[in-house]
Amino acid sequence: MPTTHPSALSFVPALSPAIIAHTTAPLPTSPLFSEAAQSTDGLDELELPRWEEEPPYMDTELDSTPQEEQFTCNLFDVMLG
């Protein structure tokens, strides 16, 4: 196992309080989060390579189908009355 020279640790920058607070926050307890944490079988990873590119991230959504447009109209009617 390689040894680390003690002076090498002095080059590691200190973490900001915001990062420390973020990493020590409790994990979500929603059923969706719990399910995803137990298994990656249900996770859709098809679009992950897009986020590995540099910004700007291109929107790759396909055009809406007539059924999707009707669903959206119905949703607006339900939500907005």
Image (cartoon, rainbow, N blue to C red):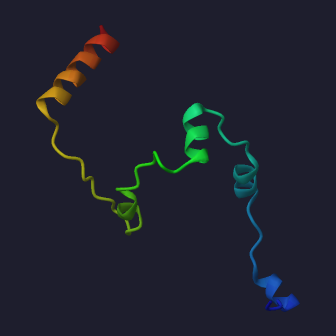
Q: Is residue 61 above or below residue 1?
A: above
Quarter-of-image position of residue 6: bottom right
The picture places residue 40, in percent across and down from the top left corner, at: 51, 51
The quarter in which the C terminus is drawn is top left
> Is residue 26 found left or right of 49 in the rendered image?
right
In the image, what residue occupies the spot 45% across and 48% down?
43
Residue found farthest to the right: 6
In the image, what residue occupies the spot 56% across and 48% down?
39
> Is residue 55 found left or right of 37 in the rendered image?
left
In the image, what residue occupies the spot 33% across and 59% down?
57
Q: Judge by depth and name the residue closer to the eye, 62 or 13.
A: 62
The picture places residue 67, in percent across and down from the top left corner, at: 16, 27
Q: Judge by depth and name the residue closer to the eye, 7 or 34.
A: 34
Q: Is residue 67 above or below residue 77?
A: below
- Count of numbered tags: 0
The picture places residue 75, in percent across and down from the top left corner, at: 28, 18
> Is residue 55 found left or right of 62 in the rendered image?
right
Q: Is residue 55 above or below residue 8?
A: above
Quarter-of-image position of residue 69: top left
The picture places residue 34, in percent across and down from the top left corner, at: 61, 39
In the image, what residue occupies the spot 55% across and 44% down?
36
Residue found farthest to the left: 66
Q: Judge by depth and name the residue closer to the eye, 18 or 77.
A: 77
The quarter in which the N terminus is drawn is bottom right
Q: Judge by depth and name the residue closer to the eye, 30 or 43.
A: 43
